[in-house]
Image: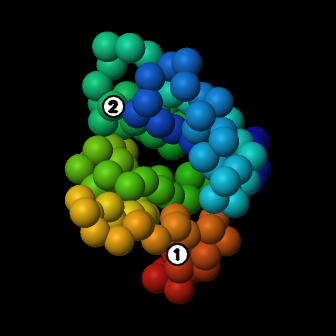
Amino acid sequence: PVHGLVVYLSGRRHGTEEQSREWCRRFGFPDGVIIHRRKGLHSQLFKTDFLRAVASSPLVVSLDAHVGDRESDDGGAAMAAGIPFIHVVHEIKEGGPPPKPWPKFEDSACMRREQS
């Protein structure tokens, strides 16, 4: 069985994994496996199929949640796969003040525990 593995599932196209890895480092997210969709695959369907496959694998002890910033894409995939969804909101307004930084991973994990 797999314990404590962090997997980043992204709607970005295959080939941009290093950009995702840098984003994770910048915002304090732990190291993990980064999986991007292949060109031509719809992001939500790719995520739904992947989450369903992982959730049903006998090698996976638990799949705690799917975290994402797109309620329709990430939330829809999590709902279709029967997995809890944590929506991370990051507002960017045209002509407005600069966006607040993304929450650090530890802060997001603490918020989830408080919501449970």
Hey, which quadrant is residue 91 in on the image? bottom left
User: In which quadrant is the N terminus drawn?
Assistant: top right
State the residue in front, 68 or 22. 22
Residue at x 63% of width, y 59% of height: 27
Residue 64, image x and y in percent? 55, 59
Type of amino acid at the residue the image marks with label 2: Ser
Which residue bears the numbered disc 2? 43
The percent position of residue 33, horizontal first and vertical second, equals 68, 36
- Three-letter amino acid code at the position of disc 1: Arg
The residue indicated by pointer 1 is 112
- 113 horizontally vs 30: left or right: left
Q: Residue at x 66, y 39 (%)?
A: 21
x and y percentages locating residue 32 in the rendered image: 71, 42
Mark 1 falls on what kind of element? helix
Residue 7, compared with residue 62, is above or below; it is above
Marker disc for residue 58: none
Q: Nearer the viewer, residue 10 or 95?
A: 95
Crowding at dot 1, Cα within 10 Å, few <14 / some 14-19 / many 20+, comes out as few
